[in-house]
Amino acid sequence: MAPGPEGIPQPFPQPLPQPLPQTYPKTYGQGGAFGGAGAFGAAFTPSAPSRAYASPRPESFPSADSAADTGSDSRDARDDDAPRGLLESRYEWIVGMMYSFTDERVVRIVIAFFTAAMGVCATLEILFGFGARTQPALGIQIGCAAFAFTAALWWLVTSWPRLWTAFVFVVLADIGIIAANLSADMPPEFAIGKTAFLAVLGLFAGVFLDRWMLAVHLVLSAGGVTAIIAWLLFTGDVPVLGALVVWAPVSALCVAIPALLYTFVRAVRLDQN
């Protein structure tokens, strides 16, 4: 104790308490401290098998107050021109969510079954007399069937594909469905029924593909349905009104299903971030 000015002992001055250093991550509170695949895997399936995908990079978005000041949500603007790494990150998010709620082997088997069904239809058409009448068209029809069986086997023996591989599969499947339909010599009702494959393929595209990739699929599917019905209109005894009545709902189905699925998945992803 040191003596004070008046001879009264005074305590030594004590230092002020210092705040503890922050130990939480810098991205805390900004949305995306953990990637989508890691978050869902940790929350729902702690024992899920390890994957080749790394946890997606966090997508830090501005707060609701700053978005209100600008009058729009900048997350929509970022979706318009996303770099390749961000596209992969979003794809890994939805793949991680799929791993959290189901066995991806079951999903691959379902996709392989659907893909093989396209080859079975083309093969049965040839065997039952609905094959193409010219050699080039018959070669196209056989090639489409071979692609369908090869793609089905690929889905069974490989692991889940990367984003760009999945996009190539969708584009080639679109082209194969349209080419096999146009090259076959079958009644109009058979040809129109086969366009349902485009709507089923849209289920995969709407869930897993990004915006511009989905747009490519929508253009191919809607354009393919239009080309098929137009070809039937000019080469067969199909009334114009009947063609229009069939074209409108089939085209709407091929476009609406994947578009609605994409909107739903994107809303969930933005809500998680």
Image: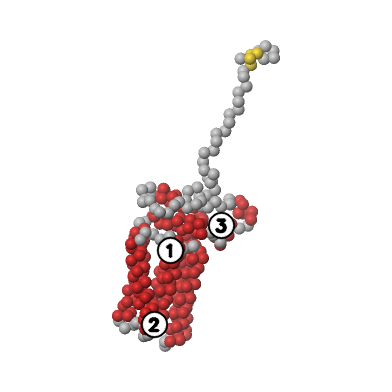
Nearer the observer, 204 or 65: 204
Residue 225: percent from the left, percent from the top?
A: 45, 77
Identify which residue is drawn at 61% across, 14% down.
1
Are the residues at dot 1 and dot 2 in contact (C-beta closer than 8 Å)? no
The three-letter amino acid code for the residue at tag 1 is Thr
Quarter location, residue 179: bottom left
Marks 1 and 2, how far apart in space?
A: 28 Å
Q: Considering only vertical position in the picture, is 105 above or below 238? A: above
Identify which residue is drawn at 41% across, 80% down.
182
Q: Which of disc 3 and disc 1 is earlier in sequence?
A: 3
Residue with the mark numbered 3: 75
Marks 2 and 3, how far apart in space?
A: 49 Å
Badge 2, how many Cα within 10 Å: few under 14, some, many 20+? few
Q: Which of disc 3 and disc 2 is earlier in sequence?
A: 3
The three-letter amino acid code for the residue at tag 3 is Arg
Q: Which of disc 2 and disc 1 is earlier in sequence?
A: 2
Whether residue 225 is visible here, answered yes or no, is yes
Side (left or right) of 103 relative to 257: left
Residue with the mark numbered 1: 165
Between circles 2 and 3, the one closer to the viewer is 2
Residue with the mark numbered 2: 136
The three-letter amino acid code for the residue at tag 2 is Pro
Q: Considering only vertical position in the picture, is 80 above or below 31? A: below
Nearer the observer, 237 or 249: 237
Badge 3, how many Cα within 10 Å: few under 14, some, many 20+? some
User: Quick one: which residue is furthest to the right in this view?
Assistant: 5
Are the residues at dot 1 and dot 3 in contact (C-beta closer than 8 Å)? no
